[in-house]
Each structure stands twice: as structure tokens, then as C-alpha cells.
Image (cartoon, grey):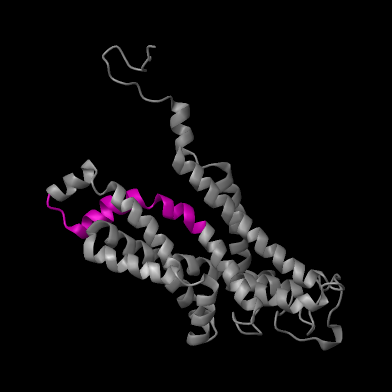
């Protein structure tokens, strides 16, 4: 059977059709749709003070557990606070923790994984054995223990997430660095006498970061859900700061009468996760082209 190659008469392969080239350069629609969803959440968080109809901390015991009305579109909670305003202001906390709770581990894990993959031997052994120890513990139990030790609050939660979640990024980057370390362009860079830090920064990481970018949106979802879970258990952001997890927990006793108190924050979390999942899936499809 004869294979027909797409070559010119001079034997030089032709360039791929422009349509295929443009398709590889164009981001999938899922990325744009997810970006619009996440962008709306970010805008709501940034302009919460202008969007929220009421002060999220203002108490109104007379109108506690009020049904949705023109003045309170989502009703009021058990202390008479406007539910819609609290949902809007909670976006500031949850989105911030979601992004930082994934970005900080990504930076730490990328650095450690790159060092382990490039230098190998002793550095690799120390980094990977440390990663094994961290992964030996159940994730949420370890987070709860760290929050207990460090104290309740935003900084403690971010530190706990960073100390645990860096492992997956380190393994991803290490694996990619090991794959490309022996390629010709890496050998040429070393033969040219370039410093190791320059080879890592300019030649290795740009070609090894793809899987990390794909995973990052999913990790933002995990960090957000982690905060929601901690707050639901009473270990997250302390009251009276609005936070989606604590709002779900506070509304649970009234789920049969005022179902929206717990349902709406849960749907908001789901919508944020959907947007980030679309971005991650879209980037994965784009990189695999």
C-alpha cells in the first residue's frame, strides 16, 4: 500500500491548510463561555458595593426570615440580613480564596517540581519524598488540622491549602521536565553554556507548563469548594463576614420553609465551578490539537 505525502515537487512538505492552522490558534468556545461566566462573577465581586441593594451586615430582627419581596429579592436570613446582598458580598471572599488557594500552590509546586525534574538525584529525592508524606494523609483531615493549629481566618486557610495542594503541581511539572530534559533543544542550550536558571525559565518551563494551565481552573474549583466545606463545618471565615459555605449552613435548618436560604448559595457555587470547568476543558482540547 502506497502512502501519499503532501509535498511539493521539490520534495519539501507543504504547510498545513490555513483552516487547520487557524483552528489550532483559536480557543474553543468552551473557554470563551467559561470566561464570560467567571468574568461576571469577578465583576460582581469587584463592584459588590455598587450592586448590593443593602448592607450585608445590617440586622433587622423585625423582618427575619422574610420571604422574597421587592425590597428583599431573596428574602432575609435568621437575623434579618438581606440574603441577596450577602450572596453578592460573599463572592469577594470565596473567589479570592479560590484563586489564591490554587495560584499559591501552583507557584510553589511549579518551582519545586522544576528543580526536582531538572537537577534530579538529591533534589528530586527530597521533593518527591516530601510530596509522598503530604499525600499520605487524607486531604480534608490534614486541612482541618492545619486550620486548628494556625487559627481560623483567611491567611490560615491559604497557608493550609498551599502546604497541601503544591504536590500535584510538583508532580505535573517534574514529569514534563523529565520528558523534555533530553530533547535536542535542551541539550543545545546546555552545550551553549547557558546558566541552569535561564534554561529552566526560558526553555524548560514554557514547554512544560501546559498541563499545569489545564489543571489550574479545576484546582480553583477545589479551593473554592474547600473553603465552602470548611465554612459549613464552622472552620472557615469567621462570622459575620458573608461566605457561601456559612450561608448554606445557616440556611439548612430552614430548608423546608425558606429553601432559598441554603439553595441559592449552593447554586452560586455550582455556577462558578461550571465556568471554571468549561475553561479547563477548553484549554485541554486546545493543547491536544
Q: Position of residue 256 (x, y in %)?
A: 86, 72
Q: Main secondary structure of the magenta part?
A: helix
In the rendered structure, does residue 205 fall within the stretch colored magenta? yes
Residue 19, above or below 62:
above
In the rendered structure, does residue 61 fall within the stretch colored magenta? no
Q: For the point 25% across and 57% down, which residue is it? A: 118
Residue 156, above or below 274:
below
Q: Position of residue 29 (x, y in %)?
A: 58, 42
As drawn, the residue found furthest toward the front would be: 136
Q: Nearer the viewer, residue 228 or 10?
A: 228
Q: In the shown orientation, is residue 36 left or right of residue 55? A: left
Residue 209, above or below 231:
above
Give the magenta range: 192-217
| Image quarter hosting the C terminus | top left
Q: For the point 49% across and 69% down, which residue is it? A: 101
Visible in this render: residue 49? no
Visible in this render: residue 127? yes
Q: For the point 51% across and 71% down, which residue is it? A: 138
Q: Position of residue 89 (x, y in %)?
A: 65, 73
Q: In the shown orientation, is residue 184 left or right of residue 272? A: left
Amino acid at each position: 500500500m502506497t502512502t501519499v505525502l503532501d509535498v511539493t515537487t521539490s520534495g519539501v512538505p507543504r504547510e498545513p491548510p490555513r483552516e487547520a492552522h487557524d483552528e489550532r490558534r483559536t480557543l474553543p468556545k468552551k473557554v470563551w463561555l467559561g470566561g464570560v461566566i467567571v468574568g461576571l462573577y469577578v465583576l460582581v465581586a469587584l463592584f459588590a458595593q455598587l450592586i448590593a441593594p443593602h448592607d450585608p451586615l445590617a440586622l433587622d430582627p423585625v423582618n427575619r426570615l422574610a420571604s422574597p419581596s421587592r425590597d428583599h429579592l431573596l428574602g432575609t436570613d435568621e437575623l434579618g440580613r438581606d440574603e441577596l446582598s450577602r450572596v453578592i458580598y460573599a463572592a469577594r471572599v470565596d473567589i479570592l480564596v479560590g484563586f489564591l488557594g490554587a495560584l499559591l500552590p501552583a507557584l510553589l509546586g511549579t518551582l519545586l517540581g522544576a528543580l526536582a525534574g531538572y537537577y534530579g538525584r538529591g533534589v528530586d529525592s527530597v521533593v518527591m519524598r516530601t510530596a509522598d508524606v503530604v499525600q499520605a494523609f487524607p486531604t480534608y483531615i490534614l486541612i482541618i488540622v492545619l486550620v486548628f493549629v494556625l487559627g481560623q481566618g483567611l491567611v490560615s486557610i491559604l497557608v493550609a491549602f498551599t502546604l497541601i495542594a503544591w504536590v500535584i503541581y510538583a508532580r505535573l511539572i517534574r514529569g514534563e521536565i523529565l520528558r523534555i530534559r533530553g530533547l535536542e533543544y535542551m541539550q543545545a542550550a546546555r552545550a551553549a553554556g547557558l546558566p541552569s536558571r535561564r534554561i529552566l525559565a526560558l526553555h524548560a518551563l514554557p514547554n512544560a507548563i501546559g498541563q499545569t494551565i489545564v489543571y489550574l481552573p479545576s484546582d480553583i474549583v477545589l479551593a473554592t469548594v474547600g473553603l465552602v466545606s470548611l465554612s459549613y463545618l464552622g472552620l472557615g471565615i469567621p462570622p459575620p463576614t458573608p461566605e457561601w459555605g456559612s450561608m448554606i449552613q445557616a440556611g439548612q435548618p430552614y430548608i423546608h420553609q425558606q429553601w432559598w436560604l441554603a439553595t441559592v448559595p449552593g447554586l452560586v457555587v455550582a455556577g462558578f465551578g461550571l465556568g471554571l470547568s468549561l475553561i479547563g476543558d477548553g484549554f485541554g482540547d486546545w493543547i491536544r490539537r
